[in-house]
Image (cartoon, rainbow, N blue to C red):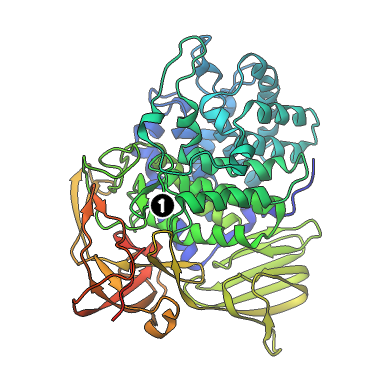
Amino acid sequence: MRPAALQPLPLDSVRPGGWLLERLRLQAAAMAGRLDEFWPDVARSGWIGGDAEGWERGPYWLDGITPLAYLLDDERLKTKVRHWVDHILDHQHPDGWFGPRSGEATYADHDVWPRVIVLKALLQHLDATGDPRVLPAALRFCRLLDGMLDEWPLQEWAGSRWTDLVWVINQLHDLTGEDWLLPLAAKCHQQGFDWFAYAAALPFPEKVPEATLLAYQDAADGTWMNDNHLSSHGVNVAMGLKAMPVWSRHEPATAELLLTMIASLDARHGQASGLFSCDEHLAGLHPSQGTETCTVVEYLASLEVALETWGVVEELTDRFERLAFNALPASVSPDEWTHQYVQQANQVICHVTEDRIYTNNGPDANVFGLEPHFGCCTANRHQGWPRFSSHLWMRSPDGGVTALSYAPCSFETDTLSVVVAGNYPFEDQVEISVRGSGPVRLRVPGWAVEASLAIDDEEPVALTAGSVHEFVASGEHLLRLHLDAAVRAVVRPSGALAVERGPLVFSLALGEDWRQIGGEQPHATWEVHPTTPWNYALAIDPDDVAQHVRLTRGTVGANPFSPAAAPIRLHLRGRRIPWEIEHGAAAAPPPNPATSDANLDDLTFIPYGCTTLRVTELPWVTD
């Protein structure tokens, strides 16, 4: 199997810092670190001998809490992880099967999908602890799987999500060198959905009609979903992006086909935050269509695997940051106690409504709560920040390290000790203290208009945007990296504008009225209603936005991803225009140039990830 270009740093060697550390601590103190104490599907999961759900929800939670526990070196969380890991390993069936089993000859007793999530969590636990039980248990399961797939081929969710199974098998081969794993990976690939053909020609160019998604039950083979249901499902598509990088370890391939698939999704379903719409199936370009929170974290995971496989590919690295700094924090309340099932780029109200724009999501899909609409995201969303933290920097085969993003952190390898200070992406200066010897490779983002690097007392040297700059360390050094960015107005497919600076997308911030409609605090269910107007057109020249915008900065606090604490703001002007609510959401942006004789108003834009209510795609108006 071909080696990966980069490897993640061991979990026990990475320490997030600054605002990122506080974000992980917030997760630990809120839902992520407490879900097993009150939510039945984790607290009484069938995976630990309970009477509640024994499919994917417990494994999803374990897959997020495991890296969180070891990145924070939090003994309370590590105790929770050990409880789950001990039970799973101690109760592995004699034939190698993991988890609940009824003993009947049904597909449920041969469903691989939740076992894949458990293996992902176990491998992270192994990475942090060296637990000697993990590899033998994982190999026993794979031996069983090799024969079982001949009688019970991959189907349903496992058939669509074979990419994660091959990713796990690849890791096991890297760790053990067991060559019998390679034909098993090939078998999974052959039985799984063809994401390669999908990438070459996207079969869903428009919003998927709900009528094509009708599920069915076939008692003969257990199949209960049609192909359109599975292959247009947003989370499956996000995981499908992993197909190209995981299989390129077996057959030589570049990132070209993956970039083709991403470009097709952008062209047909793209949103300003870097997501594609899926509420919960592919839903077109309307900026009020939603995107499921599980899709956010699984898209991030697929990009992380791609960056491991091929190294720095600027288009992928840029998307990696865009999702992490915008879509990921926007999917939750600032206190990390509630989340949405779907978020919207133009999200002007979060409410329960029967008249809804979604493809097939329910009336409560965009409210904030413990389990709005469906509970998969309740368990799965917690992997986002920990996995992002473990992929800020990665190791290369020559002993060097490569920076993919510059959020504050520190880590050590056999030859290097690195501390990253600063408040990136909210500020443009990054200080990197390096001690030891070896190559240190710095990604220079493609959006950087004036990038420079000063080493120790030397004069700054200009860097090329979109490149990777290599510095060979020897001793102790202080690297001062400057990454300036321009404010730009990007024309969206609707003709409306989205305002960006560096990796941050900006949205018009709206006043918020949070109304509790159910549940118990702190994880109650909330509607959020606007208290300020949202229907504006920007009074700018789209070709020269810089002359119309003023940037102000504030202190970067412990929780910058909240409306009140947004540390960077853009000030523009706009006019009210006729623009109404339609199907429970903001109607499509009016065509450009909009006309209005309303007064010019001062408008404040804050980072998308800091907002709850927002308008991200706006038309423009000329004076």
Q: Position of residue 495 (x, y in %)?
A: 39, 63
Residue appearing at x 65%, y 24% in the figure: 141
Question: What's the residue type where badge 1 is placed?
Answer: Leu
Crowding around mark 1 (Cα neighbors within 10 Å: few <14, some 14 to 19, many 20+) is many
Locate residue 534 relative to residue 380 in the image: left or right: left
* Above/below status of 14 relative to 370: below
Viewer-closest of 221 and 5:
221
Viewer-closest of 414 and 599:
599
Residue appearing at x 66%, y 35% in the figure: 166
* Above/below status of 412 relative to 170: below
Locate residue 342 relative to residue 118 in the image: left or right: left
Q: Where is residue 540 in the image (x, y as percent from the top left)?
A: 35, 78
Disc 1 designates what residue? 285
Query: Where is the N terminus found, in terms of image quarters?
Result: top right
Q: The residue tagged with tag 1: helix, strand or loop?
A: loop
- Asked where in the image residue 467 lies, by quadrant, the reply is bottom right
* Above/below status of 143 relative to 604: above
Q: Can residue 41 be seen in this view?
A: yes
Locate residue 95 relative to residue 100 in the image: left or right: right
Q: Position of residue 134 (x, y in %)?
A: 66, 34
Q: Where is residue 530 in the image (x, y as percent from the top left)?
A: 20, 60
Q: Can residue 392 be seen in this view?
A: no
Q: How many discs appear?
A: 1
Residue appearing at x 37%, y 57% in the figure: 345
Locate residue 187 relative to residue 520 in the image: left or right: right
Query: Where is the C terminus found, in terms of image quarters?
Result: bottom left
Viewer-closest of 429 and 503:
503
Viewer-closest of 547 and 513:
547
